[in-house]
Image (cartoon, helix red, strand yellow):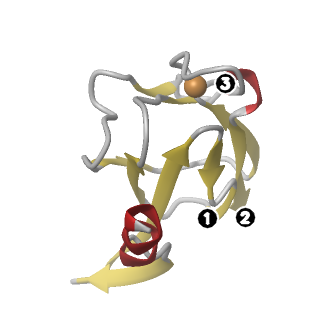
Amino acid sequence: MKKAIFLSVMLVFAASFSFAGEEVQEVAVIAKQWEFFPSTITVRKDVPVKIHITTVDVPHGFSLPDLSQGSLVVSSDKLKKGEIVTFTYTFTDAGEFDFACNVFCGSGHRKMKGKIIVEE
Ligand SMILES: [Cu+2]
């Protein structure tokens, strides 16, 4: 029950905002055994995306390798239950980028993956 309330409070949103001419996309991601929600995130190229991520159970990680500008990693010491980690990234290439949990979190860890689709 507590989890259901928490999940509804953490309503997933994907939106674009403009502040003084600077556009930002915001996305909320929930990590839990053994999935990311949402598992597919669609963003636009060349517009900064602010990703807010939290976990509702055990510590998880978030790793987005193979980017032209290097990899993007949030490690377990930061991603703990009830805490929100926010990072901002600007995708400069359109395409699909796979992300995964990079912290062992139980038997389903290996299938804990997702995808970011970057549109033109
Ligand atoms: Cu994991």
Toward the viewer: 61 or 17?
61
* Residue that badge 3 annotates: 109
Q: Quadrant of the C terminus?
A: bottom right
Tag nearer the camera, 1 or 2: 1
Does 72 sit above or below residue 21? above
CB within 8 Å, label 1 to label 2:
yes
Q: Which residue is mark 1?
A: 43
Please indicate whether residue 104 sits to the left or right of residue 117 in the image.
left
Determine which of the numbered discs, if any, sits on residue 119 in the image: 2
Q: Secondary structure at mark 3?
A: helix
Task: State which quadrant residue 22 falls in.
Answer: bottom left
* Residue 102 coordinates in the image, percent (x, y): 55, 20
Tell me the residue at 64%/31% (across/down). Answer: 100
Q: Which sits in the foreground, 7 or 41?
A: 7
Locate residue 18 relative to residue 117 in the image: left or right.
left
- Compute the Cα span from label 1 to label 2: 6 Å
Evaluate if marks 3 and 2 touch, with contact meaning CB atoms under 8 Å apart.
no
Residue 17 x/y as whole percent: 37, 82
Q: Is residue 87 left or right of residue 30?
A: left
**x%, y% of residue 3?**
43, 62
Secondary structure found at label 1:
strand
Dot 1 or dot 3: first in sequence order is 1
Q: Which badge, 1 or 2, is on the more N-terminal residue?
A: 1
Q: Quadrant of residue 68?
A: top right
Can you tell me whether the CB of the residue at mark 2 lies under 8 Å from the nearest atom of ligand 1?
no
- Looking at the rendering, the quadrant in which ligand 1 lies is top right
Q: Amino acid at mark 3?
A: His
